């Protein structure tokens, strides 16, 4: 849902697409809680933090990954899930520069339940050179993101994020100001927003990529983590076919075929979502709801910008269809 002042530009039903296809209802969840769920599912004993991958070596029987601390591990495959500045991707295809989106992002999590919570689970508030997104993540908590257009070299004084945000969003609607005000300053984090150009090969041999390592995208539609989860699901399906093939051991050609099938089945969908995220960023970048001009005795007369109405009309037609496909489309491919 997109809003300016007190007027909704666009509303979207997150429930109907799932119901029509007999799928579980879409819910928002705090990333930290989701991470805890996944970690508990796989087991803490197989995880090792602060273990940056610096290199890998592949041969016919295995692939060996080398960590920054000198530790080495062997496996049948290597899945590079090491983010936008992936060392695995660099080893496969050479270094690829992350591109700055022209926006920095402040994020916070606070214990507030707005009055509209029963009918509105996600909102985006638009303004000149900034926008604000807020989502109900359950358990009486709201997670918000404040995007501000500025140079990547801009910094805040230590602990000054909250004070700056209150100045930047002063005069916005009460809900935005309240969410910032009620969030403890030490819980407000800032990071610059980057993505990478789409690449159309994600692996070689026993090595492949998932998530941001393969297709880091901007967070305008909240699909970066979702696409990573879909990647993992499809990868599991393809590798499961190898296990069920009846072979006593993983054959190289079976592994390579499985990884290529995964890549092929994910490429078009991810490419579309990646492109739309970049387009959404550009649309927000050029957002200008009013044009001002003066003549005679009248100065600073403000009228709605014509291009703004064209964009809104386009979004009202296309975005519900795209979001419906985004939320449910993977299962139809």
Image (tube, rainbow, N blue to C red):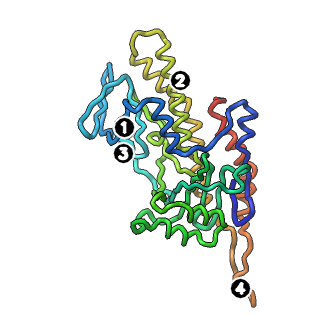
| Residue found at the very far bottom of the displayed protein | 297
Which is more N-terminal, label 3 or label 4? 3
Is 56 situated left or right of 263 in this image?
Answer: left
Q: Which residue is mark 2?
A: 237
Q: Are marks 1 and 3 in contact (CB under 8 Å)?
A: no
Q: Is there any visible trace of residue 154 in the rendered image?
A: no
Image quadrant in which the C terminus is located: top right
Please provide percent x and percent y for residue 160. Answer: 44, 68
Q: Along the line of sight, which residue is nearer the eye, 305 or 324?
A: 324
Please provide percent x and percent y for residue 314. Answer: 73, 53
Which is more N-terminal, label 2 or label 1? 1
Residue depicted at x 53% and y 67% = 165
Q: CA distance from mark 1 to mark 2?
A: 22 Å
Disc number lying in front (4 or 2): 2
Q: Along the line of sight, which residue is nearer the eye, 287 or 180?
A: 180
Which is more N-terminal, label 3 or label 2? 3
| Residue found at the very far left of the displayed protein | 70
Which is more N-terminal, label 4 or label 1? 1
Quadrant of the rendered image containing residue 45 = top left
Q: CA distance from mark 4 to mark 2?
A: 64 Å
Q: Give the secondary structure at mark 4.
A: strand
Q: Give the secondary structure at mark 2.
A: helix
Q: Which mark is residue 299?
A: 4
Give the crowd class for mark 4: few <14, some 14-19, many >=20 residues within 10 Å.
few
Q: Which residue is mark 3?
A: 95
Image height check: is 286 above or below 332? below
Which is more N-terminal, label 3 or label 1? 1
Q: Which residue is mark 1?
A: 88
Please provide percent x and percent y for residue 161. Answer: 47, 65
Q: CA distance from mark 4 to mark 3?
A: 53 Å
Please provide percent x and percent y for residue 279. Answer: 60, 52
């Amino acid at each position: 849902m997109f809003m300016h002042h007190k007027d909704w530009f666009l509303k979207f039903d997150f429930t109907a697409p799932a119901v029509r296809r007999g799928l579980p209802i879409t819910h928002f969840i705090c990333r930290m809680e989701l991470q805890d769920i996944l970690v508990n599912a796989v087991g803490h004993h197989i995880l090792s933090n602060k273990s940056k991958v610096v290199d890998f070596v592949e041969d016919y029987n295995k692939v060996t990954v080398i960590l920054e601390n000198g530790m080495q591990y062997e496996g049948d495959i290597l899945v590079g899930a090491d983010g936008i500045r992936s060392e695995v991707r660099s080893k496969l295809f050479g270094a690829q520069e992350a591109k700055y989106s022209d926006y920095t992002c402040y994020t916070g999590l606070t214990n507030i339940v707005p009055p509209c919570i029963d009918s509105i689970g996600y909102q985006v508030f638009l303004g000149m050179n900034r926008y604000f997104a807020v989502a109900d993540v359950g358990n009486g908590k709201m997670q918000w993101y404040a995007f501000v257009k500025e140079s990547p070299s801009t910094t805040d004084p230590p602990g000054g994020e909250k004070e700056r945000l209150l100045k930047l969003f002063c005069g916005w609607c009460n809900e935005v100001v309240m969410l910032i005000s009620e969030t403890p300053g030490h819980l407000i984090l800032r990071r610059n927003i980057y993505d990478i150009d789409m690449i159309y090969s994600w692996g070689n041999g026993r090595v492949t990529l998932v998530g941001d390592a393969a297709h880091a995208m901007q967070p305008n539609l909240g699909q970066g983590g979702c696409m990573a989860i879909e990647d993992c699901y499809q990868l599991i399906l393809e590798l499961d076919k190898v296990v069920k093939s009846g072979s006593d051991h993983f054959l190289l050609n079976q592994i390579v075929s499985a990884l290529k099938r995964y890549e092929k089945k994910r490429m078009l969908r991810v490419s579309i979502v990646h492109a739309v995220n970049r387009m959404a960023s550009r649309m927000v970048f050029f957002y200008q709801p009013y044009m001002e001009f003066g003549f005679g005795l009248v100065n600073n007369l403000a009228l709605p910008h014509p291009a703004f109405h064209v964009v809104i009309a386009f979004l009202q037609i296309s975005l519900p269809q795209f979001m419906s496909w985004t939320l449910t489309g993977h299962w139809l491919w």
